[in-house]
Image (cartoon, coloured by chain):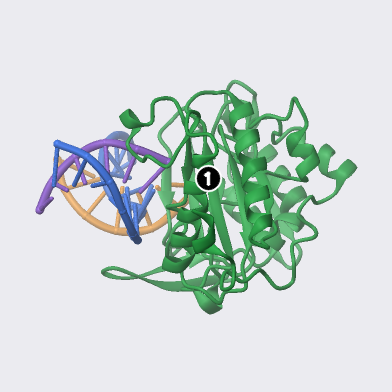
Chain colours: A green, B orange, C blue, D purple
Amino acid sequence: MKLRIGPYAFELSRPAKVLFPDDGITKAELVDYYRRVGPLMLNHVRDRPVMMERFPDGIEAEGFIQKDVPRYFPEWIPRATVNKQGGEVTHAVCNNLAAIVYLAAQACITIHVWLSRVDRLDRPDQMIFDLDPGDDDFSVVRSAAVDLRQLCASQGLGTFVKTTGSRGAHVVVPLDRSAGFDEVRSFARTLAQALVSRDPGRRTTEARKDKRNGRLLVDVMRNAYGQPAVAPYAARPIRGAPVAMPLSWPAFERDGTGPRSFTLRNACDYLDEHGDAWADWPRRGYSLSGAGIPAMA
DNA sequence: GCGAGGG
DNA sequence: CCCTCGCAACGCAAG
DNA sequence: CTTGCG
């Protein structure tokens, strides 16, 4: 089956192949989803190295992670070659709708992107907090996110929130790229510790699973070079095909909003009705310098 | 999903 | 010819 | 040093 997206044409093999057996979601439906959210998604993935999470035989089978662009990918897929410890890797970069849809046609269910852009790979333009609950109780995620938003606001930092599609949520601060990853991570760690201290019975920064004791993990370790995070609007390889959904704060706080409320099947309707919750992402991000780190502890 | 390599 | 295999790797804490 | 963890 031939697909044409703008000026680019490519083959979609086995469009009727079922990728989500419990839901009957086919590869063609995945492609159609990404074609529809792609224009919105582009704002958040443009100029960022991509990590692909692919399931050619469906989510019930083993999938695999792929960073390097295979040689058979068409030449019109944008690329960025980045340094890693023992050499370099060439990532795909989704700068056009066709690139996103091509990845979907490759059974890439989840697109992950870096927190920095190709012109300044060592300078993140966002700081991310991953709120990962110990169980499936989303109310602890909700209250932590709201507290974190308030904490950031007290530092003069604006925040955006998305469900991840699995169990938790991401709280994201746009940055002006004046700081490197180490400085951003250390700032995030301080905020995370302040967040935990507000409710230490239900929150922790403890990486060790056995020391976590069912508490919500406030994870800042994604704020590092080469570390990808699930892209806004990306689908997850989970029954029901939940998607990572950017939300307005009121929508996020709404009782009944859960980590898997938004799916490949209902996200587009929601977007048609409510628009892009992250449309107000600032042209220039916030600066960490000047924010009162020492005063906080 | 696809190419590379082995039996 | 068919079958199998590879397809990622940062920063930290703990042992 | 290696391993677990996300």
Res A281 → quadrant: bottom right
Which residue is at the front of the view, A170 or A60? A170
Instruction: Find numbered disc 1 in the image and state the secondary structure of the residue it sits on.
Output: strand
Name the residue: 43% across, 58% down.
Answer: A67
- Residue type at mark 1: give it: Asp
Q: Nearer the viewer, residue A78 or A74?
A: A78
Q: Residue at x 54, y 40 (%)?
A: A131
The answer to whether A257 appears left or right of A76 in the picture is right
Q: Is residue A11 visible?
A: no
Q: Position of residue A297 (x, y in %)?
A: 49, 53
* Residue A225 in view (yes/no): yes
Eyeballing the image, is A225 above or below A194?
below
Q: Which residue is mark 1?
A: A130
* Place of residue A34 in the rendered image (x, y in percent of width and height, measured from the top left): 69, 48
A103 vs A142, nearest the viewer: A142
- Residue situated furthest top in the rendering: A22
Crowding near the residue tagged with mark 1, few <14, some 14–19, many ≥20 C-alpha atoms within 10 Å: many
> In the rendered image of this protein, does residue A289 appear above or below residue A170?
below
Give the residue drawn at x 58%, y 45%: A13
Where residue A218 sits: x, y (%)? 49, 42
Residue sitting farthest toward the right: A273
